[in-house]
């Protein structure tokens, strides 16, 4: 029974990922919001960035036909491939690198060359923030990388992280629009952010900043991050003034999201329902919510769907990711339900942390399998070594890169609870409510 539940969970996860297929999502959006055409003597400047950049750019190029186009595509190395009609550049993710810095310089140069008769089309998807590191004046790539690592390690959520990162960058927080001025910008955005705040997706290169420099400074002080940041970052933030609020604006269109993927999974899963489409915060709290939902569910078979993006505060030296750690925590915290169950937590991009896994797929036997392999599940969890724990249990979720990214999906499948055995000394004739 557990084996069939595991297969069903993987099938539903595949359905959720397919619902965020970038080319199809863009195609559907363009039926409502067509691509802009250049003015007389103008051209199209197509800039695609993120994990879904290549399929989105391919769809846009196909629809642009014979229009004069300069296309620049930036994506992570795993999804990198040549694309006819475009210059494709690889970049580091989740840690920015020199390749990403070179890509950012190319994007900046292209935007600065845009004229009023040109039209800029931006295709934005998750991961774009790390892939286009454009340090503000006085900062180095190493400064930004160190700051980014700190934000990941200290468990800042995506909005908090981007509030600060936008103050350290030339492109984030509306930078593409400011650089392209006077050319108008139209953006099509595949959201990996819960709640679909477009100012947060890829740090909002076509959207006004999340907040002010002062708000970033307040957050850093509240989290005690100041002493741990590079000196150049501290100096920059101390002297930073916010971008004017009345700058040029882009036309921004949302083409896909985590909620749309959850809805697709529900449509494909018998008895499925969404329990929480904003599963955020620390993985320990998220695991507690999932266990509580499992114990509160009736004896009938059930399919409980969650979606979101949790955080992990790193305390150990192990390897893993938020989905793997969430799966391991659920496996260790789930009480004896008296029924078969499986729990899947996966990143829709196919990558969870710096590992080859998308996440984890666990069941009631996970902890036993870890111990049988000589591991201590609790000790591995304390060391943030969820990848090692799930690997020895055979519970890693491996999908490879999916070419999309709409945050994370969690699926909890519960089998029917067997009826309690009947007392052989009682028969229907003894029932006071039965007429004989």
Image: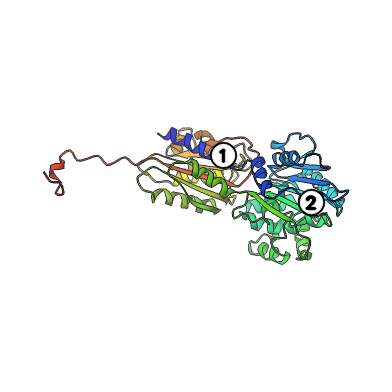
Q: Please state, as top left, top right, bottom left or bottom right, where the C terminus lies in the image.
A: top left
Q: Residue furthest left?
A: 436
Asked which quadrant contains residue 281, the reply is bottom right
Question: In the shown orientation, is residue 434 left or right of residue 46?
Answer: left
Query: From where the camera sits, is residue 351 visible?
Result: yes
Query: From where the camera sits, is residue 378 visible?
Result: no
Q: Residue 98, image x and y in percent?
A: 79, 43
Q: Residue 405, image x and y in percent?
A: 63, 44
Whichever of labels 1 and 2 marks the residue nearer the N terminus, that label is: 2
Q: Residue 264, image x and y in percent?
A: 53, 44
Question: In the shown orientation, is residue 284 left or right of residue 61?
Answer: left
Neighbours of disc 2 within 10 Å: few (<14), some (14-19), many (20+): many
Question: In the shown orientation, is residue 401 left or right of residue 264?
Answer: right
Please report contact status of discs 1 and 2: CB closer than 8 Å, yes or no: no
Q: Please state, as top left, top right, bottom left or bottom right, where the N terminus lies in the image.
A: top left
**Number of numbered labels in the structure image:** 2
Neighbours of disc 1 within 10 Å: few (<14), some (14-19), many (20+): many
Judging depth in this view, the residue of 122 and 398 nearest the camera is: 122
Question: In the shown orientation, is residue 293 left or right of residue 161?
Answer: left
Residue to which mark 2 is pinned = 134
| Vertical position of residue 197 compared to residue 85: above or below | below
Secondary element under disc 1, as helix, strand or loop, is helix
Q: Residue at x 83, y 57 (%)?
A: 181
Secondary element under disc 2, as helix, strand or loop, is loop
Judging depth in this view, the residue of 213 and 383 nearest the camera is: 213
The residues bearing labels 1 and 2 have C-alpha atoms spaced at a distance of: 32 Å
Q: How is the image coloured?
A: rainbow
The image's mark for residue 387 is 1
């Amino acid at each position: 029974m557990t084996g069939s539940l595991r297969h069903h969970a993987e099938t539903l996860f595949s359905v959720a990922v397919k619902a965020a297929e970038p080319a199809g999502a863009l195609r559907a959006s363009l039926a409502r919001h067509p691509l802009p055409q250049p003015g007389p003597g103008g051209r199209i400047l197509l800039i695609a960035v993120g994990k879904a950049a290549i399929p989105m750019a391919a769809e846009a190029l196909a629809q642009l036909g014979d229009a004069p186009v300069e296309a620049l595509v930036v994506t992570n190395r795993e999804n990198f491939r040549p694309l006819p009609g475009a210059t494709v550049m690889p970049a580091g993710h989740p840690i920015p690198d020199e390749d990403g810095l070179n890509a950012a310089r190319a994007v900046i140069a292209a935007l600065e060359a845009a004229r009023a008769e040109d039209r800029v089309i931006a295709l934005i998807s998750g991961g774009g923030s790390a892939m286009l590191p454009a340090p503000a004046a006085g900062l180095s790539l190493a400064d930004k990388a160190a700051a980014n690592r700190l934000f990941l390690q200290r468990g800042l959520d995506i909005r908090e992280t981007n509030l600060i990162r936008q103050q350290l960058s030339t492109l984030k927080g509306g930078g593409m629009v400011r650089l392209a001025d006077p050319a108008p910008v139209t953006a099509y955005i595949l959201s990996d952010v819960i709640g679909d705040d477009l100012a947060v997706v890829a740090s909002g290169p076509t959207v006004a900043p999340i907040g002010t420099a002062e708000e970033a400074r307040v957050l850093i002080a509240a989290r005690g991050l100041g002493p741990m940041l590079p000196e150049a970052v501290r100096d920059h933030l101390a002297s930073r003034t916010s971008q004017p609020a009345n700058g040029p604006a882009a036309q921004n269109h949302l083409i896909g999201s985590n909620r749309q993927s959850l809805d697709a999974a529900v449509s494909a899963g018998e008895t499925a329902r969404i329990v929480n489409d904003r599963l955020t915060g620390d993985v320990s709290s998220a695991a507690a919510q999932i266990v509580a939902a499992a114990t509160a569910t009736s004896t009938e078979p059930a399919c409980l769907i969650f979606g979101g993006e949790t955080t992990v505060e790193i305390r150990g030296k192990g390897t893993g990711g938020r989905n793997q750690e969430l799966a391991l925590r659920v496996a260790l915290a789930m009480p004896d339900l008296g029924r078969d169950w499986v729990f899947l937590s996966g990143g829709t991009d196919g990558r969870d942390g710096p590992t080859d896994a998308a996440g984890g797929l666990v069941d009631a036997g996970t902890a036993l399998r870890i111990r049988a392999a000589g591991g201590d599940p609790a000790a591995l969890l304390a060391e943030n070594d969820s990848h090692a724990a799930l690997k020895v249990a055979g519970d890693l979720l491996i999908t490879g890169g999916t070419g999309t990214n709409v945050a994370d999906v969690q699926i909890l499948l519960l089998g029917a609870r067997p009826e309690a055995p009947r007392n052989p000394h009682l028969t229907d004739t003894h029932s006071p409510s039965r007429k004989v």
